[in-house]
Amino acid sequence: MSGQVLLIACGAIARELVELRRRNRWDQVRIQCLPADLHNRPEKIPGRVRELIERYRTEYERIFVAYADCGTGGQLDRILNEFGVERLSGAHCYEFFAGSGVFAALSDEEPGTFYLTDFLVRHFDRLVRQGLGLDRHPELLPVYFGNYRRLVYLAQADLPELEEKAAGHAEFLGLEFAVRRTGLQPVGNMIREHIVKWQS
């Protein structure tokens, strides 16, 4: 597959990557996603990414990983360094969706901030309420979220129904609520830089 690029990605950003591929006419890019639920078990992410790199590295001219560190404590980078594969910069998806400068400013403004993306707003009940056992043990809420002060919804799409849901999630957690509309430009620019570099 000469000239083809494989994008190994977290399932939590699949919708956004498909949209970026469409907007930018990245016809040479194939997207291969891993389950979003791996975010609850980040120690498994490096091994799963390795499996895909080893499976596809002879089929594609380039492989790029659409993960940040995502709680792997540097283990993902160790795997990628073995194969000379690059990834999105940042510690987690909140940073590459917002852009590093905006995210740093939000963190400085209120270190006790819990972030949601469009995906996490949609799947909050499964990943947070049920995933953390809060549906069965609501007494655990202050254990998990006692050090947070606000919830910031980083909105990739301008959808009032998602903003309404995000506000409800903030209320459930007992946190102040704020919205920052990021769109797809920050993460799109990061990926575009790599594609342009490879084509030059």
Image (spheres, grey):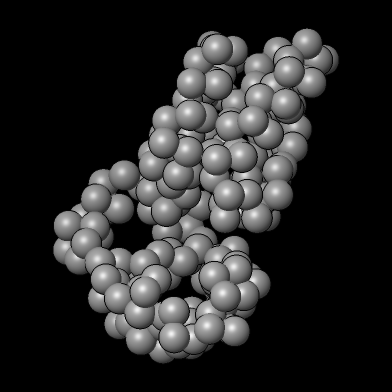
Q: Residue 15's x, y, as percent? A: 67, 55
Left-right relation of 20 to 29: left
Q: Is residue 25 shown to the viewer in this render?
A: no
Name the image quarter holding the C terminus.
top right
Please state which of residues 137 and 94 is positioned toward the viewer in this rendering. Answer: 137
Quadrant of the drawing holding the N terminus = top right
Q: Nearer the viewer, residue 182 or 103?
A: 103
Seen in the picture, residue 39 relative to 137 is either above or below; the reply is above
Is 116 situated left or right of 4 in this image? Answer: left
Percent coordinates x, y for residue 43 in the rendering: 55, 40
Front one among 86 and 197: 86
Task: Please tell me whether residue 161 is drawn above or below residue 83 in the rendered image.
Answer: below
What's the residue at 59%, 12% (across, down)? Answer: 83
Residue in the image at 62% along x and 75% along y? 130
Q: Residue furthest toward the left?
A: 109
Question: Residue 196's x, y, as percent?
Answer: 53, 22
Q: Quadrant of residue 181?
A: bottom left
Spot occupied by residue 148 in the image (x, y as percentages of width and height): 29, 72
Q: Is residue 181 above or below residue 32?
A: below
Residue at the (57%, 55%) spot, across then down: 40
Q: Is residue 12 left or right of residue 4?
A: left
